[in-house]
Amino acid sequence: MNTAPSIQFIGEHLLPGQLGYFLSILSLVASLLATFAFAKAFYATEITTQKDWYKLAKLSFIIESVAVFASFLILYYVISNHMFEYKYAYTHSDKHMPTEYLLSCFWEGQEGSFLLWSFWHCILGLVVMARSNKWKQQSYGVLMVLSFTQFCLATMVVGLYIFNFKVGSSPFIMLRHEMNWPILSRPDYLQLIKDGTGLNTLLQNYWMVIHPPILFLGFASTTIPFAFAVVGLLKKDNNWMTTALPWATFSAGILGLGIMMGAAWAYESLTFGGYWAWDPVENASLVPWLTLVAAIHTAIIYRKTGRSLKATYLFFGISFLLVVYSTFLTRSGILGDTSVHAFTDLGMNAQLLAFLLIFVLPYFSLFIFRYKTLVEPTTEESIDSREFWMLVGSLVLFLSALVIIAITSIPVFNKIFGTKIAPPEDPAFAHNQVQVFVAIIIGVLSAVGQYLKFKSTPGENFWKSLRWPFLITAIISTIIFVLVGIVYNEKGIGFLAALYVATVSSVFTVVSNAYYWLVTLKGKTKSAGASIGHIGFGLVLVGILISSSNKTVLSWNTTGINVIQKDPNAKSPVGNPMENITLFESITTDMGKYMVTYQRDTIDNLDKKFYELKFKEKKTSDSFYLYPDVLKNNKGMEGFSANPASKHYWNKDIFVYVTSFQDHSKEDTVQFKPAKIKVGDSVFYSNGYVKLEKVLINPNANRAAGTNELVLQMKVHSATGLTYEAHPTISVTGMTMRMIPDTIRAQNLILNFSNVVDQPKGILQIGIKESSTLSNLITLKVYEFPFINLLWIGVIVMTLGFMMSTYARVKKNG
Amino acid sequence: MKKTHIFLLVLIAAAIVVLISYTGDLSSYETVGSAKQKPGKFVNLIVKMDKSQPVVYDPVKNPNLLKFNVQDSLGGKIGVVYHNTMPTDMEKSERLVLKGKVQGDVFECSAIVLKCPSKYKDNPNAMREQPASLSN
């Protein structure tokens, strides 16, 4: 905007941006109009006025949807055609990027991901409209809330200045408007900008194409049950749960899937060495899922018994509010020092906070205002009823969510109160030690839940029907403990015991739900959603417990190169396990169960350097290759970024990544150091000594004719006690003398036999050269994750369960 | 009192106990000076690398040993020992968050969080400057 309008810039495509701006404003206005018109339709008492307003509202919503879809396409067009005059394309993409990752660029930035969120709201809104004949007035209310949410999201990407206050950040902003680089005032600046800054390679992963859309569909779909709850409170009509439940189960299924796809991405491409790190961004997406699952259960209780009404309103409300809160956390930059995932602060904190408060305050006011009208039966639920234990389970989930979000919100707390509280020494354990008990309780409850009846359960039947599940659980748990075991002694016996109990409890969930489905429901699929969902949830827990507690580091250095690392369990004073192992090119290194050889490396055309590592299992002599890679000059990064590789077995993954590397490329300037030596003498080098054992004359029968060889038989004793043979040689053919040095790569040592100084006394001259540039080397971390597949299978089964349940309910609702 | 209410109270009590016990685990951000006052206590330091001192990392000798020196905004200096590989970009990082404890006269570090110009996303301020490759 500081550029004089008179300059004609060459090669710019202005149309997409102008169209984009227009569409952003159109969607903003249309969503506001839709909100207003839906509200009018919702509150209208006469059928005809209702219909008129609804027509207008519907039209506005459709216009808004078209505007959002079109912005989506235009932004994609800008990125895929590499129009670097647009900041979004310049900062998030480049020309070399494989086409399949163009979508990842789209949602790398805040603007694109807001657009994605908005996109799903439109789709969901259109579905609600298509089905609105069945529940007319309710749907007007729901669409009113949805349109208002859309309005808020539209403000996020509109990019307008109102009284010097920046509202939103537009994805269609021009590079020359945003940056004040000198070259941008030149008319031909586009010819100078050859390429964009590209996409961080960590995000160039297939999971990053699919994970954000699924996750945002999960986020967007929490709006629908929330909107139903708002409408219920406004109308004092609580009969919305039957209609809302399939939306809620759909949402929970998709959100859960989206979260775990993120976990799969973290597992495959981040070098955390795991799928879950209790990172604030991960927590912020998990917490709404927990409360949503709690809400689904209390809604079922309400439908069957009329109880847990208040809890249902609270849980559905809070699930959506937590989604908005997590938006605030991850996008405001407030997480700063505590998260590696968060988006960049775009200077929209005030707006994000307003987005949060504009939902939180009215909803809770309405909830408190209507609290007295939410009537539940005054009688007590019986302790042997399904509703009682379902409510207990929901409360446990809810409190677990509260604990997680409270801990995650420490940076917010610091900001408000000016405190300087930092995360604990072992943040993951701080969560695990609490959540393992949640897993135990939820595991048992989801195992027995379906065997309980609403109102009251005959005790005898209950125990009788659980006999087989008990027995099978005992057998399977024993097999797991004997064959795999739970090995995690680091946090004391108490935690280990809790892990054992949690494993039994989650096996119990799987077994008893499978048994219920196969025996009680006779394997029918119609009402199997709950059983299948619980089986999946149980498998997820079993997978987490077994794989995390048995995760082992394979990269213990057993070569003896490191003096301090003789003990595989050695730790630094602050508990860092010594997990890195150094591999020299073409030298086979002993690494616990495997012999590993760094065979060679290649660089592909995208500047990615692949290392070929050969793993040979000592016991079976089976071997396989892994190709971890590093990328130099990743987007904006000066160093390199590592990309792990893994070998998948049915029961475990071998996971490896390069933690640092040294290139041979440096010029070798080190000189040979001369030393005089006799047979039996030793000469020191930095890491030990070299002993001359014997001088051999012509030991090699296959030498060329007319050649005489003088070979020194030397032994290199390293400080760690390992010894190496070396045979530096002088070869004489006629009048030419040739020196053949010998190299001990593992010690970075080159030995050279220079000449014979004093033949009668046997004094010889040798040269010793030590050089760190001698060989290519990498340092490596290698982990083994057993039974990680149980986790992924569990996620798929659980999602399937949620979808079956959704389908069954939609069909039943008609 | 209803049974569910009793349960609810028990659960809330449990949650409070959990949160309180968690606050016991919490650590704090310290300066180099104040961290030296509390040897053996787990703290977080926000520092810059002291570039006048060499960084020692030789994977040939030990891939799990990194030594470097840092300086905080008050000018306090301390040597750091980190038993791991050298994080990529550490020397380019404008700010480091070190987690660990002072032992003897060094800071035994258990984790390093880099605050890079672009660890994950672009820093808008860094981006606003014209890249060197573009100035001709």
Image (cartoon, coloured by chain):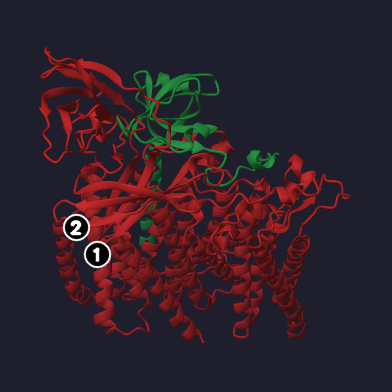
Q: Quadrant of residue A266?
A: bottom left
Which element is circle 1 on? helix
For chain B, give the colour. Answer: green
In the visual, does A627 lie left or right of A279? left
Observer-side mark, 1 or 2, equals 2
Q: Position of residue A701 (x, y in %)?
A: 11, 39
| Mark 2 residue type | Asp
Residue extending farthest to the right is A6
Query: In the image, what residue occupies the spot 22% across and 20% down?
Result: A755
Q: Which mark is residue A622?
A: 2
Which residue is labeled 1 in the image? A507
In the visual, does A687 lie left or right of A95? left
In the visual, does A533 lie left or right of A8? left
For chain A, give the colour. Answer: red
Q: Position of residue A323 (x, y in %)?
A: 54, 58
Q: Which mark is residue A133?
A: none
| Mark 1 residue type | Val
Q: Position of residue A352 (x, y in %)?
A: 64, 51
Pick whichever of labels 1 and 2 is earlier in the sequence. Answer: 1
**Are the residues flagged by discs 1 and 2 in contact, CB closer than 8 Å?**
no
Q: Quadrant of residue A423?
A: top left
In the visual, does A283 lie left or right of A239? left
Name the residue nearer the viewer: A501 or A554. Answer: A554
Letter of the chain that mark 1 sits on in the rendering: A
Vertical side of B120 occupied by A806: above or below: below
Name the residue nearer the viewer: A714 or A585. Answer: A714
Vertical side of A191 occupied by A787: above or below: below
Which element is circle 2 on? loop
Vertical side of A389 occupied by A136: above or below: below
Query: In the image, what residue occupies the spot 45% across and 81% down?
Result: A807
Name the residue nearer the viewer: A101 or A712. Answer: A712
Letter of the chain that mark 2 sits on in the rendering: A
